[in-house]
Image: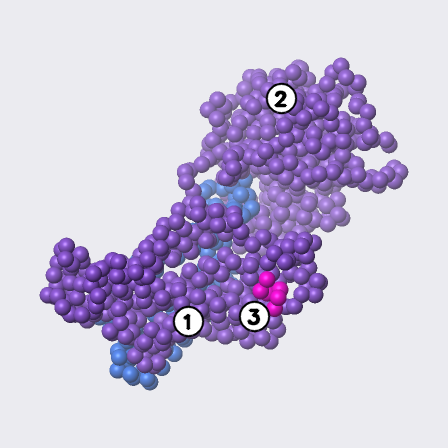
Amino acid sequence: MTVLQGTAAAAPRPRRQGAGFWRALRGNRKATAGSIILFIFVVISAFPGLFTSVRDANALVYPPRLGPSTAHLLGTTGLGQDIYSQLVYGTRQSLIIAVVAGFFATVLSVLIGVSAAYLGGFLDDLLSMLTNVVLVIPAFPLIIILAKYAGHGSLTVLLVVLIVTGWAYGANQMRAQALSLRNRDFLESARVRGERRSYIIVFEVLPTMTSLIVANFLGAALYSVLSAAGLQFLGLGDPNSQSWGTMLYWAQNQQALQTGAALWSIAPGLCVALLGAAFALMNYAFDEIGNPALRPVKARRRAVPPPTEADATVEPDGDEPRSGEPYSEEPYSEGPGSEEPGGDAPLLRVRGLTVEYATARGASVAVAGVDLDVRRGEFVGVVGESGCGKSTLLFAIARLLSPPARTAGGSVTFKGGNLVAMTEKQLNVLRWRDYSVVMQSAMNALNPVRTIGAQFKDAIDAHADYSAERIRERSVEVMKLVGIDPAHLKSYPHQLSGGMRQRAMIAMALLFTPDLVIMDEPTSALDVVAQRSLMVQIKELQQLLGFAVLFVTHDMSPVSRFSDRLLVMYAGQVVEAGPTRTVFDAPSHPYSRGLLDAFPSIHGERVELRGIPGSPPDLGNPPSGCRFHPRCPVAEEQCRHVEPPVYRIGEVDSRCLLLAPGRQPRPAAPMEVTS
Amino acid sequence: MSVLQHAVLPGATLLITSIGGWILTMRNNMITTLAEDYVRMGRAKGLSNRKIMYGYAARNAFLPNLSGFAMSLGFVISGAILIEYVFNYPGLGYLLYSAVQNVDYPLMQTLFMLFTVAVLVTVLIADLATAWLDPRARAKE
């Protein structure tokens, strides 16, 4: 594999599950338990002589049906054999069956599944059909018939039968995974390099399928152990062999349960179950490592606010020092006098909102003490790069975070109540009637199995007691508002175009004409023309109905024209906030300037577009001092150490040390906007 | 009546041994579905937990299970061989076992075909049910 590392650099292949994978496996309790059991069985099967002094466990030399004693740990069988030593010697066959049948069944699965996916066409059809036919045939009856037909089951016959019947399930999965890998970039690049197909399959495809292959082996091994035990129990194995299944057969044959030798059936049964459990545990562990969401939830975690903010009422003073924010020089606010509750109090006031993601390496702060205000009827835009925490901020405001994300501090005052401190019940009173949410991708945010109308009805029923007629009327009304034929209320989400789905989402958000509509990049999945018309429509609706909008996007163009106020977010913090026109015409923060330079202007002269060098910081370990300093073109020495407070420059709040009072009002910067 | 009475224990055994796997599969599907945007949307809409769980999450999480469910009916028949043998219950599985013991090939063939047809029929029913429950499957053709 090392040969490849250099050439594959152009299109990095997803890493083979390497060191991290094995570390995850070691840390997994199920994997540990499973491998310990398996290890014990392996040792026993390798050195049975160490565990028992009996040499021929099948010899009928003891009195039958003895109870457990020091001489016979588990007693003797109805035929006069030592049960314990039979178990010890039987281990080997079960393990051989598990490993050999599991291995070859997996090899067959991989061969047939991957070939079907890569050869394609007629051969794919043929192999898939074969797989499906084998899958549909009831396996166990087939095994029984085959085992009988092949003569009295020697171990080899048993193994062949198990392999022939055991590969199909895995082959289907292998084919599906190989198909999904087929068009990935790293394989395209291998093809472009002119690698042979067999080479690509062996060295590029198989390594990425490691975890599926291992899981498949474990599953096949489990299946083989259980089936083999079943077959031997039915007497279709070799009755003179030493195995747990054969023990069960003789126990049943001699009516062990009725004659007081119950351990004769119970002990081998438990052994089969234990070995099966070992394989199953390891299999689940692999599933969990592949899909971390499946891991058991340790404790019930909820977005519980810290006790200091347990009170769901308006704080008389919204500008008290925020947790984790050392500065208090200049209050981040709209200026004195505008804060009296009841007077001109904003509809939504967010103070010091902090959101943490629990990760393996400790908490990662995605939103760090964000302040923002939305007044009635105002259109507030939040912009920032991907991963700056803007969507997390929205979900925190709407109380829609799910673990591992949680609100760690701050308050969200909406119409006089603190959303952060509310119970789900209290929230549900406000939800949809007072504030609603429009999500990024309407395809995923609409329930695929219910019609648009039914989903409207769900929302209405949750908050009001309308008659069916009234629900219909209101649904038709909002659909007309956003310009969709109300006939589509009977449509399912997948039957609408992307733009229509997004409009339907907005229609749903307007069912109760809320005071605030929170929009998470509603236009980013649409093409430019659809984006523009949707934005115009949102603005028109807003002016018509008077709701306020909190709008998050990574795209400057929609907010530049339509928003009243603009917040620029970087690495979980608001770095600049002010009236949209001011921020656009004269950005004060170096990051805002960089962001604006990255977008072309239709009007005005042609200027060279500049991006921002570097990439957003890791929020688990943000840079010291100003979070933007590593990428900032005008950073100074102090920016590395001093966390900048928020300074007010005219109508704009900006989080940059270069704007400190006493310095020249505008730092001389190479990125100065000239227009 | 006695048929039912004697089926209680074998039936219970069958249920207990197979239900665990289904619970696990459904749990895993549920967890995957709960991370979907439409579940979060359900929360945003302020729907009751029950509505979100059954109408939004479970409805969708169940769909991929359907065909597997049908397949497992075939495995129920095969699993029943062992159970019927243990309980001496004179069902199809036991019949197959005695056919094998007596090397009765015609009976084996007939039973085997019966099992296969049963699986095919359940798969067909599952496909129809999927079409009924999942509007996207209806739209394919």
Q: Secondary structure at mark 1?
A: helix
Residue shown at 26% from the left, 72% from the top: A241
**Between A57 and A509, the one nearer to me in the picture:** A57
Q: Would residue A200 appear left or right of A423 to someone viewing this image?
A: right
Residue shown at 79% from the left, 19% from the top: A665
Chain drawn in purple: A
What residue sits right under mark 3 in the picture? A116
Whether A202 is drawn above or below A556: the answer is: below
Real-space Cα distance between discs 3 and 2?
Answer: 66 Å
Q: Would residue A500 appear left or right of A227 to someone viewing this image?
A: right
What residue sits right under mark 2 in the picture? A345
Give, as a single range, the part of the protein colored magenta.
A198-203
At label 2, which amino acid type do we have? Ala
Magenta-highlighted stretch: main secondary structure? helix
At label 3, which amino acid type do we have? Ala
Chain drawn in blue: B
Q: Position of residue A422 (x, y in %)?
A: 49, 30
Real-space Cα distance between discs 2 and 1?
Answer: 73 Å
Q: Would residue A355 appear left or right of A334 to someone viewing this image?
A: left
Chain to which mark 2 belongs: A
Q: Residues within 10 Å of mark 3 (few under 14, many from 20)?
A: many
Chain to which mark 3 belongs: A
Of the image marks 3 and 1, the number of the one nearer the N terminus: 3
